[in-house]
Amino acid sequence: MPTSPSDEIRTDFQSIILNLQRHWAQQGAVVLQPYDMEVGAGTFHPATTLRALGPDEVWRAAYVQPSRRPSDGRYGENPNRMQHFYQFQVIFKPSPADSQALYLDSLKAIGLDPAKHDIRFVEDDWESPTLGAWGLGWEVWCDGMEISQFTYFQQVGGIECNPVPLELTYGLERLAMYIQGVENVYDLDWDGVSAEDGGKTYGDIFKRAEVEFSGWNFEQADTDMLLGHFRDAEAECGRLLALETPLALPAYDQCMKASHLFNMLDARGVISVTERAAYIGRVRSLAKGCCEAWMGLAESSTNG
Amino acid sequence: MADLVIELVSEEIPARMQAAAGRDLARLVQAALTTLGVWGENSTATGLCAPRHLLAYVTDITASQPDRVVEKRGPRVDAPEAAINGFLSSAGLTRYELVEEDTPKGRFFFARSEIAGVNTAQLLAPVITDILTHFPWPKSQRWGAAKFRWVRPLHRINVLFDGKPIGGTLDLGGGSAIQFGATSCGHYFEVPADIDLIGVRSLDDVKARLRAGYVMLDQDERHAAIIDGAKALAETYSCHINEAQLGSYLHDISGLVEWPTPLLGKIEDRFMLLPPELLQTTIATHQKYITLSDANGAFSPYFILLSNRLAEAARDQVIVAGNQRVLRARLADAEFFWQQDQTRPLDSYLPSLGEVTFYEGLGSILDKANRMEGFASAIAQHMPAVDIAASVRAARLAKADLVTGMVGEFPELQGIMGGYYAAAGGEDTAVCAAITAHYRPQGPADDLPPTPEAMVVALADKIDTLVGFFGIGAKPTGSKDPFALRRAALGVIRIIVDAKLTIPLGKILDEAAKGYGFAAVDADLLPFIRDRLRGYLRDQNMRHDVVAAALAGDDGDDVCLMAARAVALAGFLEAADGSGLMAGWRRVSSILAAEEKKAKTSFAAACDPALFTPIEKDLFVPLSTMPANAGTIDAQLAALGALRSPIDVFFDKIVVNDDDPAIRLNRLGLLAMIREKMLSVADFTKIEG
């Protein structure tokens, strides 16, 4: 074990989540549940994307979000890469003056005492071309390994964030692997219960899903159907935004769908390099429209 | 005289921005103090930057602005009373305080007032907030509810003048502000207590106070600590660091630490079977660790990583283990590709090159490989001591590694991996070496391909690229050269010149154009290559006028000959005969220019020997027997050099403007002969001075 968590801090995967939730609840965050749609990153959750813009002056939220990246699937054979994984996402608006200290405290809460490690903040500017969003910040290293993304949002959906939110993203599998001293993600202890007592590892729960979804993502998914779904989602999103009273949240659901369908099409290898930029542009214009509608700027959203 | 300290504490500044930030702050502070009039004769400004600290230290500025006299011209002394009263009220003076003075435009009233200089301390706050508000960060951000932008959230502004704090406020907007203070802070994890800056007397004093808080403010100091520490650590394992190579990323790693502590890591034995270039790329380029060589110069399994903590055995063990874990995952990836890629022979990757576009309109990489294979033998024919078959084979295989897993993950290993994979598949060693080195030279400082076969493939690759991009009109313009065609042309030139290849470049370009199905080589390409040759020769410290003279009017394709001509001409002009000849040349050309202007005609290079005196004959004989453009450039220049003395004697003893027009014309014809001969060797009109 590379680390020595104190006795009372449990390091199984679900305890890490529970401890992060408890820590951030104590800091005043609303603890939300994952959004019930396929997304590529925790940032897509409306609690981040839309609430980063408004309407609340103060917005604090924390949640786990499963992330789907179809092209990262490796049929369960790579010890570090999966098409489905978990992010723990924190959004604090306005960014607190002691943002870095708050973050470091959260590491203590999961058994990673900064005093016993070498923690660094290394430049990593964040940009999401599909969300029309960017921010400045760092990737956080612990003993040379990236364990979190730390970002001060500047823009979302092409709109300036005012006030500026702090976004923290913990890569839960990687963090847990380090804390547990495990080399293969599928060996992670999920529940802290021994195998004899029916305890489960990450592999027990997700390995089969990785194998099957990799097969679907790369080989089986019907590309004509995916293309059709993409067009449908895009059209429906546009229609909802063009209503006299735009329906921002349902429109944004369609935008998230379109984004995931694009990722699927990409994994199936049917999008050429030149088309790729055009698809990203189409999703971005949906996201922009949704953000504008959410903020009541709908009149300018129809031809984004 | 007093010193000024401005220290800013923020969250971590990106490593790549730190050096410039220090310089910019010092520069802006100096400019502002100069404008205030308090920058003194002995003033100096130093800027330093560490991850969370940015500092300017200014010495010897004046404690107050100098008193100034402000003068304002009023109306003429004979102006109407109303005008004078108007001036008085605007200046706030009485009539008796005005002075009268004569000017070229008449006698005028002047208002003179003495303005006492303000204490520097009182002037600083607005100047500093102005600098901070307009600081030139490459990228900046807002935070919280503030409107102010800085590279990352800014927390403290410490300003001290003559060791005493200066009050001031930076309004951040959105209802927040930073009050100027005099309290810095130490290492984030090592020293929670504040550091008092009151009473600082020198830059060394500031550095020492921060050093006591485990912050090395000065990047040079961090560099030295890293290099000295790494050297010492390496020595205990009988290894040494590669300082030159470390220099390329020392800034990156020193910008991530306030207090660098070198620690020793070890690569697992199983990974030592990987090629050293791959280990080097993974460990140094990607992970930014310091690689070591053992006593025999071989790649050592030990490496050095930096911790940003004070040394402490138990923690250091955790830090090393964590870093080794990251490296292990990276190397395991590399090992996977290394094994996976070699399950197939290199040539089995060729068909997949068909799916990789070389460039829109120039086909796939497979098309490129086919073209290179097609005209490699045309190049190889002119290469001494070459294995033609191996060259052609290498040209075919050179690009195959681009679709291997390893090069997909580590693009900088292109060519090198191909060489290894070719060897693993039993290809001839000459083929492997040619694949390895065919991307060379990658810049003016890069080595040339070391074998004749590698030169053939390198030339084929670069020439194919040049002909293709010129063929579709994608030529470099101004500073834009997105396909690195200048570098490709320079590579072609360096190989040809250094290997002294006599190669019909025009014909080779034609062959390359056939591969594309172009009707002809683009007309701009050869002139472009000749132009790069001029640039190359100038980069060899050759005088630009000598290069111009040697290459003027040459529309040929023999790069080696052109370079040789420039080198020979430069040498000739340095030697006694050459520089002496140039004195004669200047007289010849100025006399001819003057006379031809008068006569409104140019004189033919011909004369009648019957009219000569013996002295003229001594000049005429070598001139008329000199073979036209024959022999090597050295022989031609030697022949010109032999004219020096007869020309000198001629000008010493003979007057060109003889009273007899026939003799005069004959002598001008003789000078025209000199001109003709000299210009046939090089364009001496281009030589300056």
Image: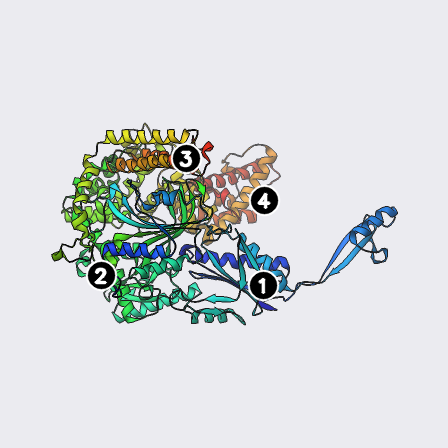
- Residue B5 vertical position relative to residue B571 in the rendered view, above or below: below
Residue type indicated by callout 2: Ile
Quadrant the C terminus of chain A occupies: top left
Marker disc for residue B167: 1
Q: Position of residue B380 (x, y in %)?
A: 24, 41
Front position among marks 3 and 1: 3
Quadrant of res B186: bottom left
Q: Secondary structure at mark 1?
A: loop
Labels 2 and 1: the sequence-earlier one: 1
Q: Give the alpha-carbon distance from disc 3 to disc 1, as whole Å.
A: 47 Å
Marker disc for residue B655: 4
Front position among marks 4 and 1: 1
Q: Position of residue B637 (x, y in %)?
A: 42, 46
- Residue B322 vertical position relative to residue B493 in the rendered view, above or below: below
Marker disc for residue B257: none
Q: Secondary structure at mark 3?
A: helix
Res. B458 in view? yes
Labels 4 and 1: the sequence-earlier one: 1
Q: Give the alpha-carbon distance from disc 3 to disc 4, as whole Å.
A: 91 Å
Residue type indicated by callout 4: Val
Side (left or right) of A262 relative to B12: left
Quadrant of res B321: bottom left
Q: Give the alpha-carbon distance from disc 4 to disc 1, as whole Å.
A: 86 Å
Front position among marks 3 and 4: 3
Q: Secondary structure at mark 4?
A: loop
Q: Position of residue B489 (x, y in %)?
A: 36, 42
Identify the residue position indicated by label 2 in the image.
B267
Marker disc for residue A289: 3
Viewer-proximal residue, B373 or B280? B280
